[in-house]
Image (tube, helix red, strand yellow):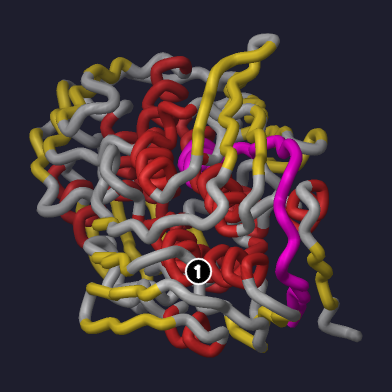
């Protein structure tokens, strides 16, 4: 397995371009299955998860491929095999997003129960419950979701919990259903908004976008489109926190602050100075850090509150900040697996159940292991701020969600090197 070697103590300075959002592009690529024809998706990050979903689309019978550096073309004219196989779905939970489009388009789907990061159970029960409410007949057989429906029918569905992928899956199923569908307690994340906007461009009739109540008037058919995905707010937040942790000053290009308000509020609370605007039609966010950050307390919650995907990064920041901070993780039950690794680097953290209390101090480089995607980012930030050299193992998690991270960090002045597995 590849590793990252990071020599800490470098101040991050400079500019970096933010990539397209992984969590937006995956459902958007799945949505291309809803319409026969060729869809072109721009601002697609080159990530392992994206490549996995392209394999899923090709296994189904679509023709999906990179057409340029950050552009994907999907020809969904024919869907010959509505099966998302276990060997692909087990590596990425988001593969379950093909369930809704397949049911809506051809009335059947066979999708393996998903895998992905080990940060919690993340069940798909709301997906299944919602599809059944739309009229689908669903059974779980030999580890697969077997779904059939002659024609989906509009319904009112109240989700038991706020689920991003659940909202996206049901939204994609409902756009071709007969009649009106109302989704209550829907997720409001920007990535859900981006998917809804793309579906409307395809000819769907969705209102209430960005609110917990989505209203969908079913249509007979959709058309293939060209669409550009929004920028990755979690990637952007990660670089902002890295700059704050190293006493740096960075400008992020291609990202609007409206996507990161909760994160930027906490960075301001930590002592960083943040400005934003538009230059030559391109959004930017600028962060200038204080000499020493102040610890902050956070509670993760669905958008627009503080995102769980930024929890590990802020924990790393708190580990070198002045004072104590309390972090409460309300989304995933296993998302503190980075704490033992931070403690290996000298972090002072006490934790129980879903609450961790940090006391700032110094970190020192050490061999550590990444346990999930965002834990990887947290360990990188800790390594950048630490004294000495840190080796981060199992960075295949990192490759699932951060495009060209070594290159971008190096541009900002970090000393980071990928150690290939064969060395």
Q: Is residue 289 above or below residue 299?
A: above
Report x, y in % for residue 390. 70, 80
Residue numbers of the magenta segment? 1-30
The residue sitting at the right extreme is: 423
Q: Is residue 176 visible?
A: yes
Relative to 403, say whether 337 is above or below: below
Q: Nearer the viewer, residue 173 or 44?
A: 44
Left or right of 113? Residue 45 is: right
Indicate the quadrant containing the N terminus: top left, top right, bottom left or bottom right: bottom right
| Residue located 50% across and 59% down the image | 84
Within 10 Å of disc 1 (Cα), the crowding (few <14, some 14-19, many 20+) is many
Q: Is residue 52 left or right of residue 261?
A: right
Which residue sits at x=77%, y=76%?
5
Which residue is identified by label 1?
320
Instruction: Classify mark 1: helix, strand or loop.
Output: loop
- Toward the front, the furthest residue is 291
Give the position of the C terminus as an image quadrant. Answer: bottom right
Q: Position of residue 323 (x, y in %)?
A: 35, 67
Image coordinates of residue 254 in percent, x first then y, are 63, 27
Q: Is residue 336 left or right of residue 338?
A: left
């Amino acid at each position: 397995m590849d590793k990252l070697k990071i020599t800490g103590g470098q101040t991050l300075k400079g500019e970096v371009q933010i990539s397209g959002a992984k969590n937006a592009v995956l459902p958007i690529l799945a949505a291309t299955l809803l319409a026969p024809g060729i869809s072109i998706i721009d601002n697609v990050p080159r990530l392992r998860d994206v490549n996995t979903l392209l394999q899923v689309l090709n296994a189904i019978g679509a023709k999906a491929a990179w057409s340029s550096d950050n552009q994907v073309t999907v020809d969904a004219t024919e869907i010959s095999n509505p099966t998302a196989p276990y060997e692909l779905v087990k590596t990425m939970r988001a593969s379950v997003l093909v369930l809704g489009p397949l049911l809506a388009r051809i009335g059947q789907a066979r999708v393996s129960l998903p895998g992905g990061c080990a940060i919690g159970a993340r069940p798909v029960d709301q997906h299944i419950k919602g599809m059944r409410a739309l009229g689908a007949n669903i059974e779980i057989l030999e580890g697969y979701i077997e779904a059939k429906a002659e024609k989906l029918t509009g319904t009112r569905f109240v989700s038991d919990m706020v689920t991003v992928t659940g909202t996206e899956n049901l939204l994609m199923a409902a756009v071709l259903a007969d009649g009106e569908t109302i989704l209550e307690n829907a997720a409001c994340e920007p990535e859900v908004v981006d998917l809804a906007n793309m579906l409307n461009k395809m000819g769907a009739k969705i209102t209430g976008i960005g609110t917990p109540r989505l209203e969908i008037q079913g249509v007979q058919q959709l058309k293939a489109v060209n669409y550009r995905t929004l920028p990755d707010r979690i990637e952007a937040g990660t670089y902002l926190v890295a700059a704050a942790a190293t006493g740096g000053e960075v400008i992020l290009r291609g990202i609007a602050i409206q996507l990161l308000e909760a994160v930027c509020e906490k960075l301001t609370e930590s002592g960083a100075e943040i400005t934003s605007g538009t230059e030559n039609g391109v959004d930017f966010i600028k962060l200038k850090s204080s000499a020493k950050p102040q610890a902050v307390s956070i509670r993760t919650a669905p958008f627009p509150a503080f995102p769980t995907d930024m929890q590990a990064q802020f924990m790393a920041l708190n580990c070198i900040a002045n004072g104590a901070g309390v972090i409460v993780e309300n989304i995933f039950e296993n998302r503190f697996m980075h704490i033992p690794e931070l403690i290996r680097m000298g972090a002072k953290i006490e934790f129980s159940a879903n609450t961790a209390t940090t006391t700032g101090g110094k970190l020192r480089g050490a061999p550590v292991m990444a346990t999930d995607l965002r834990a990887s980012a947290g360990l990188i930030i800790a390594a950048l701020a630490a004294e000495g050299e840190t080796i981060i193992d199992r960075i295949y998690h990192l490759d699932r969600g951060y495009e060209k991270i070594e290159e971008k960090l190096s541009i900002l002045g970090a000393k980071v090197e990928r150690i290939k597995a064969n060395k």
